[in-house]
Every structure is written in structure tokens, then in C-alpha cells.
Amino acid sequence: MRETVLLFHFSDKDRRNRLVRALLPMRMKIKEISKEDYGKPVGYLAGNVDILPGQPHAAEEELSDELMVMAGLSGHRVDQVLRAMRKSGVLVAHKAVLTPSNQTWNVYQLFEEIHLEHERMAGK
């Protein structure tokens, strides 16, 4: 799978543009996903041809915060992405690496899991 960064709910275009500019030198695919595709498996959105798009799914609500998913990146490349983000000043609270476990989840499921993880770590 080609190195890909998926962006969800980046409504602040300045933040999105700064993030994209920070990642462009890394020569990875950057794909902004629209709300209409949030019901599809994240792995499918990242380009995994082995994952079917699933049944058409009515778009639910917009996410409550931005989400970034990194697919096909080695640990070293993830570290490079995180460094580039810090350097650009664009921090994204909800971010994930695509894994065999979460690649079949839709965007809402992944976002909810990350959100719950943040709450557990914060002791809520």
C-alpha cells in the first residue's frame, strides 16, 4: 500500500493547508475524505484493494473534531510525520495508524475508539 495520510473534518482551511505543506516534502499521498464517505471502511479509503467498500451508508453527522489516519507508513515515517506536524504548529488530537484490526472500521467507529482512548488516558 502506498504511504497515505487521510484527513477528516479539517474545516479550518489554513490549518489543513499548513499540514499539507508540512507533509508534501515526504512525498506521500494526502487525501481529504468527505463526510459522505465516513461510513466506508478506513482501509478502503486508504486504498487497500482487499477491503470492499461495504454497503451504501447514509452520511451521519460530522465528526466533533479533526481526525488524521496514517496508512502504509513505517514507524520511522510516522515519527517523521509527527515531527513535521509539530514543526508546522498543526497538532491533531485524534490521529491513528491504520492496522489490521481497525482497517475494517468505518470513520465513526475509529473516531469513537480514539476518543474513548483519550478519555481513559485522562482518567475520565
Image: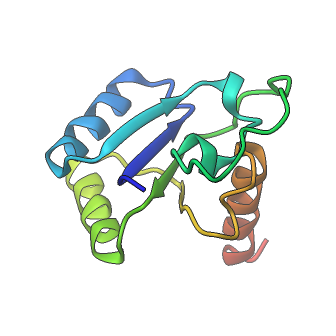
Residue drawn at (35%, 67%), measured in percent from left and top? Answer: 78
Looking at the picture, does residue 6 appear above or below residue 103? above
Query: Residue 73 location, x and y as percent?
Result: 37, 64
Q: Residue furthest left?
A: 25
* Colour basis: rainbow
Residue 9 position by quadrant: top right
The quarter of the image holding the C terminus is bottom right
Looking at the picture, does residue 60 appear above or below residue 5? above
**Closer-to-camera residue (78/45):** 45
111 sits left or right of 34 in the view:
right
Looking at the picture, does residue 5 appear above or below residue 113? above
The quarter of the image holding the N terminus is bottom left
Residue drawn at (32%, 62%), measured in percent from left and top? Answer: 82
Counting every numbered tag in the picture gives 0
Query: Residue 16 location, x and y as percent?
Result: 37, 31
Residue 120 position by quadrant: bottom right
**Closer-to-camera residue (106/62):** 106
Query: Residue 66 location, x and y as percent?
Result: 56, 40
Query: Residue 88 location, x and y as percent?
Result: 22, 47
**Closer-to-camera residue (87/52):** 52
Residue 77 position by quadrant: bottom left
Residue drawn at (45%, 56%), measured in percent from left and top? Answer: 70
**Closer-to-camera residue (46/49):** 49
Residue drawn at (77%, 36%), measured in percent from left and top? Answer: 39
